Image (cartoon, rainbow, N blue to C red):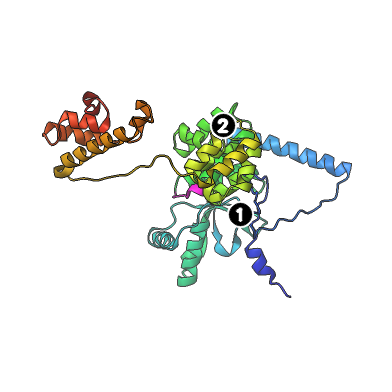
C-alpha cells in the first residue's frame, strides 16, 4: 500500500535544539502516538574533542549575550517576501491568530503600514528565517497576492546574526509574543516552564526564587502566580504532558504534584482520567503525600464510587423575598440539628449546613429593616458585628 509522505509530514512535530519541555505519552491516553528511537553511531575521539570545544565556546557566547544583551536593531532592511521562510525549529508554539484577528492585522497594515518590523536571521546569502513576525509575514503575503501592490512585496525587518544563541533566540520569541497577545492556558504554562529552564540553565540567577522573580517581572504577573505554576514542575513528565494536552485540569495537576513520581504514575495508569480530574476523589488520593504504593492502590479502589461530601448551592433572591427565605433556612437548620444531634457532636452538626451571604448587601438590608440581626446571625452562624464589617 502506497503512502503519501507529505501527509505523514503534516502530522510530525519537530523540535530542534534543547528539549526544555516534556514530550511524554501514556499508551492509555495516546493510542495514535508512535515513537521511534534512532541509533547514532559513536564518533571518533577527534570529533568528540571538536564537539566539546564548540560546546564550550557556545556556552561562553551565551553567557556574554545574556550579560551584555544583543543589539537586534542594528541591521534594518526591507526584504522581499519571497526570500523569507518560516522557521522549522518548533520553538514558536504560540497560538496563531484566528481569521478575524488576521483580517484586522491585514487592515491595519493596509491602512497605516507595519508598525513593528519582523526579526529574522540569515539562512544563507539569499534567504532568511523568521524569528518573530509570522502573522505579520502572513498578512503581507496575503496583501501582495491579492493586490499585487509592490508596496507589500518587501517587509521591514531587523536582521540578527546567523550564529545567534539558541536560548537568546527562544527568549526573544517568548518576549515578543507573551506581552502583546492573548495566549491560551496551555501556552501560558509552556512559557513559564520554558522561561524557567532558559534562565536556570544560563546560570545568571542564584536560586529558583530569583528565577521566579525575574519571570514575574518579565511577564507582568505576581510572584505567587509564577510559584503556583512552578508547582507543576514536581509532576512526572507523563502528567505534565497531559496538562499540556488539556487532558488534566490545572487544579488537579497541582494536587497530583504532591505525590512522588512513582505514585503519580500508578494513578495515571490505574485510575480513570475522569476520576483523576474529580477534585474530591483526587483529594482522597493525595491527602498523604508520603503514602506507600499499597495505600494509593487501596484509595484508588475506594474512590471509584466516592461522591462529594459537601456541595455548594447558589440562590439569588429578591430583597422582598429575603426575610421569608431566611425563615425557611432557619427552620431547615433546626430540622437538621434535631435529626443528627443524637448521633453527631455539636461541632459536626453545625458543619452540615453552612450559609454564606453577600456582606455588603446585608449591611444595607439590615440598615433599611429588610432583615433583623437575629435572623442574620441564625442563618450564618456568625456574630452580627462581624457580618456587618465590610
Residue that badge 1 annotates: 29
Q: Position of residue 286 (x, y in %)?
A: 55, 36
Q: Quadrant of the N terminus?
A: bottom right
Q: Kindly state the secondary structure of the residue where label 2 is placed.
A: loop
Task: Identify the mark nearer the N-term, 1 or 2.
Answer: 1
Tell me: 94 left or right of 37: left
In the rendered image, the vertical position of residue 174 relative to residue 81, given as above or below: above
Residue at the outermost front position = 342
- 384, 4: nearer the viewer: 384
Q: Residue at x 54, y 28 (%)?
A: 209
Q: How many marks?
A: 2
Tell me: 263 left or right of 375: right
Alpha-carbon distance for marks 1 and 2?
26 Å
Q: Position of residue 102 (x, y in %)?
A: 44, 61
Residue that badge 2 annotates: 288
In the rendered image, the vertical position of residue 77 relative to residue 3, given as above or below: above
Residue 183 on the magenta span = yes
How packed is label 2: few (under 14 Cα within 10 Å), some, or many (20 or more)?
few
Q: Which residues are magenta?
A: 181-186
- 28, 284: nearer the viewer: 284
Q: Position of residue 117 (x, y in %)?
A: 49, 52
Looking at the rendered image, the disc whose residue lies closer to the viewer, 1 or 2, is: 2
Residue 285 on the magenta span = no
Q: Position of residue 38 (x, y in %)?
A: 78, 54
Q: Residue at x 24, y 25 (%)?
A: 383
User: Is residue 68 visible in this depiction of the protein?
Assistant: yes
Amino acid at each position: 500500500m502506497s503512502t503519501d509522505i507529505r501527509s505523514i509530514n503534516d502530522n510530525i512535530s519537530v523540535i530542534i535544539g534543547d528539549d526544555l519541555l516534556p514530550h511524554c505519552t501514556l499508551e492509555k491516553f495516546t493510542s495514535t502516538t508512535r515513537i521511534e528511537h534512532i541509533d547514532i553511531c559513536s564518533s571518533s575521539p577527534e570529533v568528540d574533542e571538536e564537539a566539546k570545544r564548540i560546546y564550550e565556546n557556545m556556552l561562553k557566547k551565551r553567557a556574554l549575550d545574556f550579560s551584555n544583551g544583543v543589539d537586534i536593531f542594528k541591521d534594518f532592511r526591507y526584504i522581499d517576501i519571497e526570500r523569507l521562510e518560516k522557521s522549522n525549529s518548533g520553538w514558536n508554539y504560540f497560538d496563531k491568530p484566528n481569521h478575524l484577528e488576521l483580517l484586522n492585522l491585514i487592515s491595519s497594515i493596509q491602512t497605516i503600514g507595519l508598525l513593528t518590523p519582523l526579526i529574522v536571521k540569515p539562512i544563507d546569502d539569499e534567504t532568511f528565517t523568521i524569528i518573530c513576525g509570522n502573522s505579520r509575514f502572513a498578512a503581507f503575503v496575503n496583501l501582495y497576492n491579492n493586490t499585487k501592490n509592490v508596496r507589500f512585496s518587501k517587509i521591514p525587518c531587523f536582521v540578527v546574526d546567523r550564529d545567534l544563541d539558541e536560548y537568546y533566540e527562544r527568549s526573544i520569541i517568548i518576549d515578543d509574543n507573551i506581552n502583546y497577545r492573548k495566549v491560551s492556558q496551555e501556552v501560558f504554562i509552556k512559557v513559564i516552564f520554558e522561561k524557567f529552564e532558559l534562565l536556570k540553565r544560563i546560570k545568571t540567577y542564584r536560586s529558583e526564587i530569583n528565577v521566579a522573580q525575574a519571570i514575574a517581572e518579565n511577564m507582568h504577573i505576581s510572584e505567587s502566580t509564577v510559584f503556583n505554576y512552578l508547582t507543576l514542575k514536581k509532576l512526572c513528565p507523563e502528567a505534565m504532558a497531559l496538562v499540556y494536552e488539556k487532558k488534566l485540569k490545572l487544579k488537579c495537576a497541582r494536587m497530583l504534584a504532591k505525590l512522588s513520581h512513582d505514585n503519580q504514575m500508578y494513578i495515571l495508569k490505574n485510575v480513570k482520567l475522569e476520576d483523576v480530574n474529580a477534585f474530591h476523589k483526587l483529594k482522597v488520593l493525595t491527602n498523604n503525600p508520603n503514602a506507600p504504593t499499597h495505600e494509593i492502590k487501596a484509595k484508588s479502589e475506594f474512590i471509584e464510587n466516592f461522591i462529594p461530601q459537601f456541595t455548594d448551592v447558589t440562590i439569588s433572591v429578591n430583597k422582598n423575598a429575603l426575610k421569608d427565605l431566611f425563615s425557611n433556612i432557619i427552620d431547615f437548620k433546626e430540622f437538621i440539628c434535631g435529626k443528627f444531634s443524637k448521633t453527631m457532636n455539636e461541632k459536626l452538626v453545625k458543619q452540615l449546613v453552612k450559609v454564606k451571604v453577600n456582606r455588603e448587601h446585608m449591611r444595607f438590608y439590615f440598615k433599611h429593616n429588610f432583615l433583623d440581626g437575629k435572623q442574620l446571625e441564625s442563618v450564618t452562624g456568625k456574630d452580627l458585628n462581624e457580618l456587618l464589617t465590610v
